[in-house]
Image (spheres, rainbow, N blue to C red):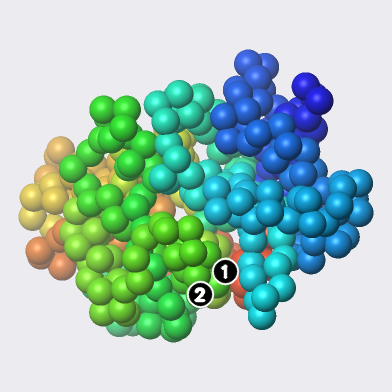
């Protein structure tokens, strides 16, 4: 029974987003804080497709009526996916990130946060070994040049307008930093969740339902404060995170790299019109990747394209129309998968899981 957490870690590592082993065993400590031994054992019988209770009970060697209430409770805790349609329950294995961890926004403790922050670099390192990423970066409308041939899935506002249901939830990254007395002054209620994911959040008492207009307002206010819109990497994303470079575990860790642009999914990069640039440094101050710096001789901004992730924050901050987003070269442009399922299928193939 003591090895059940090691088995669970291996089971989660076989999901597309992974759950890599560490020398310190911090990944096991995290699982012990989240799962009881019974919950960990039952999770081993789940797969990454929704299933009724019967095949799960058969794999687990348990009676369906005995484990179904446990699985329902695990769904409420955000440890697995539980869906009830027409009175019929189905259950599914959940990634650790993005997935189990984000659902723990109301269950955070200082010990859990400490262990997660120790583990994040291992997660990030594992995820960026592959071409397809879970998240991508898209600009807001204000930063888009009308000459750009931009698709609807590359615009935050258009993504939001296409949704039938929207929940806004607390940002777990900023919440965990606040609990650890390292929070920033950025707004906390900034995670937008769409469609079926929104219903799941709602059923767990996380977040609140908002309108398209409210969602767009949240994005615009967030961008003013330097937050980067990051939807899930598909043409039909399930969420948009508004991330800061001081708390977001993704941005904070890739900022430490020499060339963040090479691993972030984005089809744009910033460009300076030196004839219009006044050297006010507004773009330099707002850039989350330190991709903009001043040319001290010419007193104008310059962009390090190896660091620029194409978020467009510099464009929104420039009052002199000196900054613009431009398309990356055709060979560098990326077309996201059609939906999140295809995203994870692509990651799984790249990891050799199929």
| Residue on which disc 1 sits | 234
Say which of 224 and 307 sits in front.
Answer: 224
| Residue on which disc 2 sits | 195
**Looking at the image, which residue sits at the far top?**
24
Where residue 33 appears, x then y in whole percent? Answer: 57, 29
Say which of 304 and 285 sits in front.
Answer: 285
Q: Do the residues labelled 2 and 1 touch (CB within 8 Å)?
A: no
Q: Which marked residue is nearer to the observer: mark 2 or mark 1?
A: 2
Whether residue 222 is situated above or below residue 158 in the rendered picture: above
Whether residue 344 is situated above or below residue 110 in the rendered picture: below
Whether residue 139 can be seen here: no
Quadrant location of residue 307?
Answer: top left
Q: Give the crowd class for mark 2: few <14, some 14-19, many >=20 residues within 10 Å.
A: some
Quadrant location of residue 340?
Answer: bottom right
Using the numbered discs, state the Cα–Cα distance from disc 2 to disc 1 in whole angstroms: 14 Å
Q: In which quarter of the image is the C terminus?
A: bottom right
Left or right: 155, with 342 as reference point: left
Q: Give the crowd class for mark 1: few <14, some 14-19, many >=20 residues within 10 Å.
A: many
**Looking at the image, which residue sits at the far front?**
65
Where residue 344 appears, x then y in whole percent? Answer: 68, 59
* Element type at mark 2: helix
- Choose the circle earlier in sequence order: 2 or 1: 2
């Amino acid at each position: 029974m003591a090895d059940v957490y090691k088995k669970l870690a291996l089971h989660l590592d076989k999901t597309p987003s992974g759950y890599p082993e560490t020398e310190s065993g911090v990944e096991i400590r995290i699982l012990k804080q989240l799962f009881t031994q019974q919950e960990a054992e039952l999770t081993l019988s789940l797969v990454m497709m929704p299933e009724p209770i019967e095949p799960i009970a058969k794999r687990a060697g348990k009676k369906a009526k005995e484990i179904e209430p446990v699985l329902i409770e695990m769904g409420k805790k955000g440890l697995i996916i539980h869906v009830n349609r027409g009175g019929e329950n189905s259950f599914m294995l959940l990634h650790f990130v993005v997935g189990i961890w984000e659902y723990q926004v109301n269950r955070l403790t200082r010990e859990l946060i400490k262990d997660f922050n120790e583990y994040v670099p291992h997660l990030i390192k594992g995820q960026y070994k592959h071409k397809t990423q879970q998240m991508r970066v898209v600009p807001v409308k204000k930063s888009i040049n009308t000459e750009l041939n931009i698709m609807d899935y590359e615009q935050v506002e258009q993504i939001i307008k296409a949704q039938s249901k929207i929940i806004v939830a607390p940002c777990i990254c900023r919440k965990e930093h606040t609990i650890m007395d390292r929070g920033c002054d950025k707004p906390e209620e900034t995670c937008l969740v769409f469609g079926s994911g929104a219903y799941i959040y709602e059923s767990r008492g996380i977040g609140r339902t908002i309108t398209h207009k409210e969602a767009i307002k949240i994005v615009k206010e967030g961008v003013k404060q330097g937050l980067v819109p990051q939807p899930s990497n598909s043409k039909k994303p399930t969420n948009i995170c508004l991330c800061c470079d001081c708390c977001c575990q993704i941005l904070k860790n890739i900022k430490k790299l020499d060339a963040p642009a090479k691993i972030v999914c984005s089809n744009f990069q910033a460009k300076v019109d030196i004839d219009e640039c006044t050297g006010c440094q507004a773009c330099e101050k707002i850039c989350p990747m330190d991709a903009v710096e001043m040319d001290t001789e010419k007193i104008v901004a310059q962009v390090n394209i190896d660091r620029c992730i194409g978020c467009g924050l510099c464009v929104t901050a420039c009052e002199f129309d000196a900054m613009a987003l431009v398309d990356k070269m055709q060979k560098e442009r990326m077309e996201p998968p059609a939906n999140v399922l295809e995203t994870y299928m692509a990651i799984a193939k790249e990891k050799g899981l199929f």
